[in-house]
Amino acid sequence: MGQHSAIWQGYVDSSLMGSGQFDKAGILAADFSGLEAQSPGFTMSQEDINTLAAAFTDPASAFANGFSIGGEKFVCIKADTRSLYGKKGKEGAIISRASACTIIAHHGESVQTPNAATVVENLVDYINNPQ
């Protein structure tokens, strides 16, 4: 556990899960070495984490191959050096990279991806530039 893990756990609990938009969420270490905080029962294999890291480096690969979160495969609908968005049916995943971590948030069928994305992107902006 890194020095940030208690802070990250607070973000998972209040900013992500507390928003009511997500059914599971986690925060990865800045170097993609593993999860530093997560909602109960949320896990990521190092293989899936490595795939996400590669997708930020080569967004075209994310569009071509999709990505997995917690063993679930997602089709990539947005990929750039900051954010990956994925869909699996009506479920969605938002992965967004901050300066000190990467946020992963999964939403269920009743949530709209743009609304969910706003929560994650705003949190990344806050982490990058706290006021």
Image: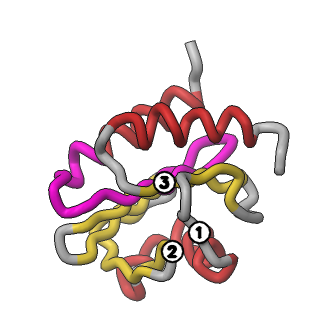
Disc with the residue nearer the chain's start (3 vs 2): 3
Identify the disc placed on residue 43. 1
Mark 2 residue crowding within 10 angstroms, few (<14) / some (14–19) / many (20+):
some
Label 3: which residue? 25
Q: Do the residues labelled 1 and 3 touch (CB within 8 Å)?
A: no
Disc with the residue nearer the chain's start (1 vs 3): 3
The furthest residue to the bottom: 65
Label 2: which residue? 70
Report whether 116 appears left or right of 100: left
- Label 2, label 1: how many angstroms apart (C-alpha)? 5 Å
Q: What stretch is highlighted in magenta?
A: 96-116
Q: Which amino acid does label 3 sit on?
A: Ala
Q: In this view, does 117 lie above or below 108?
A: above
- Residue in the image at 76% along x and 38% along y: 4
- Label 1, label 3: how many angstroms apart (C-alpha)? 9 Å
Q: Which amino acid does label 2 sit on?
A: Gly
The furthest residue to the top: 131
Quadrant showing the C terminus: top right
Q: Are marks 3 and 2 in contact (CB under 8 Å)?
A: no
